[in-house]
């Protein structure tokens, strides 16, 4: 049995976007992304027009999963943050429960500032996501509830 | 795990191609990538060794179209088939919505198929899934080679339930989209159940 789907309501989505926007501003970052540990992108904020965020989400999730595996091999539960510093662009990743907060930044910011701001905001994101999980399916019509075999077949024609 | 975003009106599902080394998992994805219109796909990411063997995973996002106003996207992953990459295979199964087992039809690869399918069941269990309850397709690949086993024999040996069995030649694309369609339909049917 597959896991229960995560349903993200419009209002929750905008709340998350607002939190990410503030983090981006406070940390002078270029792009901020929130993804889940399975590599699904939840929200993105910033100058991402030329960024393949779908691939980025998948690779970040793979990266965190691999590092989590290394952590367990050495007796740690996980590595709560990961940083990759490039010559111009850098990436900081925070593991917040089943969420991954990804901050991309350049010389306009610093790793220390990004770490600090990410940490300050992680509790808020965690609370918001807990609400999403808690709200579950109640009062929300799944777009697939009334789907017919013809609807499914139409995707493949 | 399926992710439904009501704001962007998107549904994302994860499908994993599993199987023994050199069975054609990556070739399946490459064919889907090459045969799909640019607007319906993202990049094909391959984390491979210098000899083009999958090291961690291949990944490509594929948009199938719109259902009830929601864009339906499938994230397709492969696992590394080589036995010693088991830790990576476990990680990639996390959050899976549907599995394709790509079997190598050649007689001398039967043991590898059996070992890999057993490994799939064990790794799914470790992630809290039951293969019997998961959308699942058995693809019998390399049907163009001379030393292959009959379909009935492979299906009998490797079949786990009443899963769809698709004959394929991934290198030419034969059966590749039939396989994808068979697993995607099951995933969407699961979503209908709620």
Image (cartoon, coloured by chain):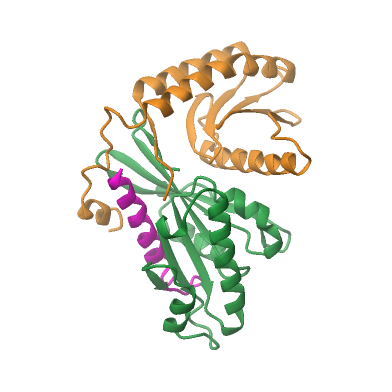
Where residue B133 sits: x, y (%)? 40, 56
Asked if residue B170 lies left or right of residue B180, the reply is right
Q: Does the segment drawn in magenta span residue B99?
A: no
Which residue appears at 65% of the width and 38% of the height?
A64
Count of numbered tags: 0
Q: Name which quarter of the figure residue A67 lies in.
A: top right
- List x then y, in percent, for residue A90: 70, 28
Q: Is residue B66 above or below residue B146?
A: above
- The letter of the green chain is B
Q: Which residues are magenta?
A: B167-194
In the displayed structure, does residue B22 sit left or right of residue B37?
A: right
Among the chains pictured, the one given orange colouring is A
- Residue A20 visible here: no
- Residue B175 inside the magenta-drawn segment: yes
Quarter of the image for the C terminus of chain A: give it: bottom left
Nearest the camera: B152 or B105? B152
Overall secondary structure of the magenta stretch?
A: helix
Q: To which quarter of the image does residue B118 belong?
A: bottom right
């Amino acid at each position: 049995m597959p896991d229960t789907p995560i349903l993200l309501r419009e209002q929750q989505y905008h709340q998350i976007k607002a939190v990410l926007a503030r983090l981006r501003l406070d940390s002078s970052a270029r792009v901020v992304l929130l993804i889940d540990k399975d590599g699904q992108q939840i929200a993105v904020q910033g100058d991402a027009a030329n960024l393949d965020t779908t691939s980025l989400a998948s690779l970040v999730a793979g990266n965190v999963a691999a590092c989590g595996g290394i952590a367990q091999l050495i007796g740690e539960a996980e590595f709560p943050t990961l940083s990759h510093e490039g010559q111009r662009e850098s990436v900081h990743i925070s593991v917040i429960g089943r969420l991954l907060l990804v901050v991309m930044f350049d010389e306009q910011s610093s790793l220390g500032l990004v770490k600090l701001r990410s940490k300050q905001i992680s509790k808020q994101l965690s609370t918001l996501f807990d609400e999403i999980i808690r709200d579950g399916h109640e009062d929300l019509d799944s777009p697939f509830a009334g789907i017919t075999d013809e609807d499914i077949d139409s995707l493949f024609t | 795990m399926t992710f439904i975003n009501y704001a962007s009106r998107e549904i994302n599902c994860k499908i994993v191609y599993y199987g023994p080394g050199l069975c054609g998992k990556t070739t399946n994805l490459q064919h889907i990538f090459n045969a799909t219109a640019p607007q319906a796909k993202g990049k094909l990411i391959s984390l491979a060794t210098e000899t083009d063997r999958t090291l961690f995973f291949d990944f490509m996002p594929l948009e199938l179209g719109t259902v009830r106003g929601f864009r339906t996207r499938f994230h397709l992953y492969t696992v590394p088939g080589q036995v010693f990459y088991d830790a990576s295979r476990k990680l990639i199964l996390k959050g899976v919505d549907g599995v394709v087992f790509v079997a190598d039809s050649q007689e001398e690869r039967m043991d590898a198929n059996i070992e890999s399918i057993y490994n799939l069941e064990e790794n799914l269990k470790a992630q809290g899934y039951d293969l019997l309850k998961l959308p699942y397709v058995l693809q019998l690949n390399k049907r163009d080679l001379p030393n292959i086993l009959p379909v009935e024999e492979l299906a009998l040996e490797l079949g786990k339930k009443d899963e769809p069995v698709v004959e394929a030649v991934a290198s030419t694309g034969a059966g590749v989209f039939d396989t994808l369609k068979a697993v995607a339909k099951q995933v969407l049917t699961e979503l209908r159940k709620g």
